Image (cartoon, grey):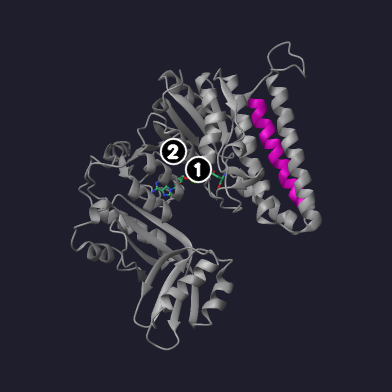
Amino acid sequence: MSTPRSNIVVMKFGGTSVEDATAILRTAAIVASRLRRNLNPIVVVSAMSRVTDTLLAAAAAAGRNDREEALKISDALRTRHLNTAAELVSNPPNSHPDEHGDRLTSLQLNIHHDFDTLDDLLRGISAVGELTPRTSDNVVSFGERLSSVLVTAAFAQQSIPSTHVDARTVILTDNHYGKAAPNEPAIEAALTEQVLPLIDLGRVPVMGGFIGSCNGITTTLGRGGSDYTAAIVGGALHAGAIEIWTDVNGIMTTDPRIVPEALRVKTISFEEAAELAYFGAKVLHPATILPAVQKNIPVFVLNSRNADNEGTKITATPPPCASPFKSIAAKKKLTIIDIVASRMLLAHGFLAAVFAIFDKHGCAIDMVSTSEISVSVTVDSKEALPAICADLGQIADVKYEGNKALICLVGEDIRGQSGISGQVFSSIAHVNVRMISQGASEINMSFMVNEEDVDEALRSLHKKFFANPDPTIFDIEARVAAMDNV
Ligand code: ADP
Ligand code: ASP
Ligand code: MG
């Protein structure tokens, strides 16, 4: 008989949860705790922390013909992976180097093989001096390819019956390199064929997040995409839960790196979490929520350094909240483009022509505001800007200004609250606010500020709106405990 799908829990561990041997051992202990509850984990891992950025730096160096630098970067990564392997895994006593089951030796061979392949690739890129999105995906995929092999061996060493699954054989995508879209029916078929039988055998499948393939060519789902992999897998298999293990206690009332007093949000709706992720809360990839919503699978955000904490539950129906907002997100490095119609009044079809230009360049718009004679939009793409502005220049006067940031307050309970925007803007009266969203969504309020004002604005807003938080929704116990410790 096959395992009930509701017993399956997809557990995604981010870069910090696999950053070194200590972190990987914590991760193994968390997975073992799920096995003890008779759950069937499927583990999705990110690359070890900072590895993705480092691989991108190696690819960029190769792309500008700097072969030496590219290989030097790769060498340092090889050492880091080999050292971590040696800390975590050992050969059984009296084993023979090429004996099957000789865990450390075969892991080391695997790591060397991957780095030899990577080095060949970097040499090839340096020789042509050109980095295509397809080759960049290939380079960057080594992060998750290596971490998943390493974690599988470490789990086996901890007596977790784990089996490595090459994510590229199950996460089948289109060929939009750098941001590939999943082919859901093909993924479901591949998971049914390759992953479910492992679970039925009582094994823990371990795969890399973020990476996939199109007709055998490696692709990636976009930065932060391991969360998305977890949600795709969970959605396809109708899992009982998806757990996103990271380095904070859950979704917080704002980024705790900017506002250390931020509180954990105990429960939040799919819609709110999606809005937060889209508007800059790095804790979740924006696409993560969709597969979960479609199948109504609860998503938990949890802390691998503090595994007993309840984390945040993302669900279709959280309880009502007495506070207007659940969390405040900020997205930096944005550009505002002001587009003024040349013939004064906005002519019929003008906006359609403007949006068609952004569409043509594949550039997503975060926020739009219109007046009688102009339209302002914000975008986060720098590369496409000159081409977009050249096209817009054909139909309008255009100017753009960078170093902007968007602040977005999210909460389903904004609905029906009168005078809330007055309270928001009076609490940041000292900050210059540029553009205010016209509010297509009823659950967010957003506006633009200069990048240098973001941290101060977040601190002021947080102070104003989370002074007396609703204890059913926010973890005020943690605040009380912190004050007791002072
Ligand atoms: P991972 O490597 O586990 O995917 P990320 O670095 O992508 O982790 O995301 C976790 C980080 O997101 C946290 O360390 C925190 O600084 C940041 N963050 C931003 N906004 C929030 C928020 N509202 N709640 C929690 N974390 C947030
Ligand atoms: N390693 C990838 C990144 O850093 C994907 C992820 O960690 O989610 O973007
Ligand atoms: Mg992440």
At horizontal 50% and vertical 28% (from top left) the residue drawn is 26
Give the image location of residue 53, x and y in percent: 61, 49
Label 2 Cα neighbours within 10 Å, binned few <14 / some 14-19 / many ≥20: many
Give the image location of residue 440, x and y in percent: 32, 63
Residue 72 painted magenta: yes
Number of labelled discs?
2
Give the image location of residue 194, x and y in percent: 57, 29
User: In this orientation, which residue lies closer to the viewer: 393 or 401?
Assistant: 393
- Of the numbered discs in the image, which one, if any, rests on residue 184? 1
Q: Residue furthest bottom?
A: 343
Quadrant of image for the N terminus: top left
Residue type (three-letter) at the residue carrying disc 2: Gly
Nearer the observer, disc 2 or disc 1?
1
User: In this orientation, which residue lies closer to the viewer: 451 or 325?
Assistant: 325
What is the span of residues highlighted in magenta in the rendered image?
68-87
Q: To which residue does mark 2 refer?
A: 235
User: In this orientation, which residue lies closer to the viewer: 31 or 407?
Assistant: 31
Q: Earlier in the sequence, mark 2 or mark 1?
A: 1
Measured along the vertical axis of the image, is residue 193 above or below residue 49? above
At horizontal 60% and vertical 33% (from top left) the residue drawn is 148
Residue type (three-letter) at the residue carrying disc 1: Glu
* C-beta proximity under 8 Å, tags 2 and 1: yes
Can residue 245 be seen by looking at this rendering?
no
At horizontal 41% and vertical 45% (from top left) the residue drawn is 289
